[in-house]
Image (spheres, grey):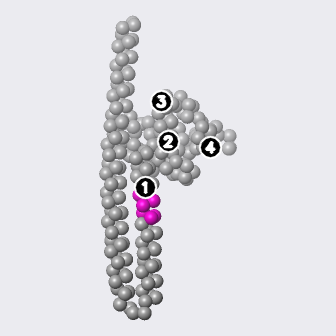
């Protein structure tokens, strides 16, 4: 390094005066925009990450959703390639599981389509009569149409899951605000009773 001090989660939490657990959550949720070094417990953040954490904090306090924050970070801060390879949005298991399953299914369907098409072409070219050729292509086309319908169903399901996740994230922000207000209220009551 060129003399710049790397910061731990605890140091960032102290600097921004927010709970360490919140910084841990944000470092996982918004990892692709946080300049860092190392992995796991050894992960340290470059000084410029404090500005990113500060932006996240400000936006969430203003009532923005995590998706809004992510969109804003995408426009203002570069993506960190090492973070993208390391953790694909580990905060959202529903989204991660759904995307992973969709990718596997799409890969399997693509392989099946390629096998079916090549088998149809091979059969058509090997057949002495050319009459089989249109029939094989028709079957391959029907198979492709069926697979396209499956892919569309998966896209629709993924969109529904994303919508539900967005609602859950907004509810989580609201619950956090309510918790902070309740803590403040209780602290004020305790202070008034003890004073």
Front-most of residues 155 and 124: 124
Mark 1 neighbour class, 10 Å CA radius: few under 14, some 14 to 19, many 20 or more: few
Task: Write the residue at 43% across / 70% down.
Answer: 112
Q: Position of residue 150 (x, y in %)?
A: 34, 63
Is the C terminus in the top left, top right, bottom left or bottom right quadrant?
top left
Mark 3 neighbour class, 10 Å CA radius: few under 14, some 14 to 19, many 20 or more: some
Position above or below: 81 against 9 = below
Q: Position of residue 50 (x, y in %)?
A: 53, 38
Task: Write the residue at 45% across / 88% down.
Answer: 125
User: Residue 149 falls in which quadrant of the image?
Assistant: bottom left
What residue would you read off at disc 3? 18
Total numbered circles: 4
Mark pair 4, 2: CA separation = 14 Å
Q: Which secondary structure lies at badge 3?
A: loop
What residue would you read off at disc 1? 101
Report the magenta residues as a range: 102-108
Residue 105 forms part of the magenta stretch = yes
Q: Earlier in the sequence, mark 4 or mark 3?
A: 3
Q: Which mark is residue 38?
A: 4
Q: Which mark is residue 28?
A: 2
Mark pair 4, 1: CA separation = 29 Å
Task: Write the residue at 64% across / 40% down.
Answer: 4
Task: Write the residue at 37% across / 82% down.
Answer: 136
User: Residue 69 falls in which quadrant of the image?
Assistant: top left
């Amino acid at each position: 390094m060129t003399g710049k001090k790397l910061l731990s989660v605890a140091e960032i939490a102290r600097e921004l005066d927010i709970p360490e657990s919140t910084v841990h959550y944000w470092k996982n949720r918004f990892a692709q925009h946080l300049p860092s070094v190392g992995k796991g417990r050894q992960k340290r953040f470059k000084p410029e990450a404090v500005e990113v954490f500060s932006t996240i904090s400000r936006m969430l306090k203003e009532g923005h959703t995590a998706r809004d924050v992510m969109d804003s970070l995408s426009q203002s801060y570069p993506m960190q390639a090492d973070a993208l390879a390391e953790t694909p949005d580990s905060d959202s298991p529903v989204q991660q599981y759904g995307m992973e399953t969709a990718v596997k299914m799409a890969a399997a369907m693509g392989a099946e389509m390629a096998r079916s098409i090549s088998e149809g072409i091979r059969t058509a070219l090997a057949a002495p009569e050319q009459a089989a050729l249109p029939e094989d292509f028709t079957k391959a086309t029907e198979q492709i149409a069926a697979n396209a319908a499956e892919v569309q169903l998966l896209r629709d399901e993924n969109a529904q899951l994303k919508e539900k996740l967005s609602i859950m994230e907004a509810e989580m922000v609201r619950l956090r605000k309510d918790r902070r207000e309740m803590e403040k209220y209780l602290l004020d009551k305790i202070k008034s009773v003890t004073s």
